[in-house]
Amino acid sequence: MCTGLAISCSELPASFVEANVDHLYLREGREELQFHWWQSPAMLPVRWGGKIVNVRWGSKLKRSPLPLGGWIEREPLEAGSLAHMEPEEVVIPANLGFQHGTWFLIEEGIAGVLIPETPLGPVAYMLMVPSTNYYRNMTGQTSRMPVFVNQVI
């Protein structure tokens, strides 16, 4: 899985950075926004409708019509498991991902799915697939990994 991500502020519109100062961190003298699953509410930046917006990251509620968690397997999604919710493909922009204490490089972003109409507003999930051997070793034997945009780890 991937339980956190970071994106350089220099790659984001200034208005987005200003609206998300509570996610601002300094890494090696450079400002970045970090988003983590453990934050409440958990939020994700997504490219949607031609701009970057911040939406809720999945659902932590067991009694919800939404899938539990912040990740969705690609295979069942492609088979139509969420067709009734009219999911839309999105890209989650990121320079770094985080899993089990390890930060790793991300070139373009992570593939995601957004459910536009929910009682909480739009909700996004990271798409997951079985981990490559390298990803498993890098992240402490994590069996699932995100779908990276134009990148293989």
Image: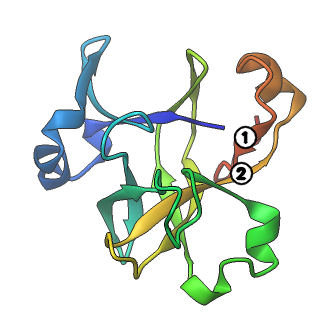
Give residue 74's position: percent from left, percent from top: 75, 62
Image position of 56 (left or right of 30): right
Q: Secondary structure beneath disc 1?
A: strand
How far apart, in angstroms, are the residues tagged by discs 1 and 2? 5 Å
Quadrant of the rendered image containing residue 127: bottom right
Q: Amino acid at mark 1?
A: Met
Pick whichever of labels 1 and 2 is earlier in the sequence.
Answer: 2
Secondary structure at numbered mark 2:
strand
Going by the image, does 141 lie left or right of 55? right
Which residue is tagged 1? Answer: 145
Q: Residues within 10 Å of mark 2 (few under 14, many from 20)?
A: many
**Residue 141 vs residue 60, the one in the foreground:** 60
Q: Identify the residue shown where x is 68% and y is 52%.
A: 150
Q: Residue at x 19, y 52 (%)?
A: 16
Give me the residue at 47% from left, 56% from top: 59
Residue at 17% in and 35% down:
22
Which residue occupies the extreme front position in the image? 63
Counting every numbered tag in the picture gives: 2
What is the x, y in percent for residue 65?
53, 73
Against 29, is 76 above or below? below
Query: Residue tagged by mark 2?
Result: 128
Q: Quadrant of the C terminus?
A: top right
What type is the residue that disc 2 sits on? Met
Q: x%, y% of residue 34?
A: 34, 33
Instruction: Give above or below for 60 relative to 83.
Output: above
- Where, quadrant-wise, is the N terminus in this rendering? top right
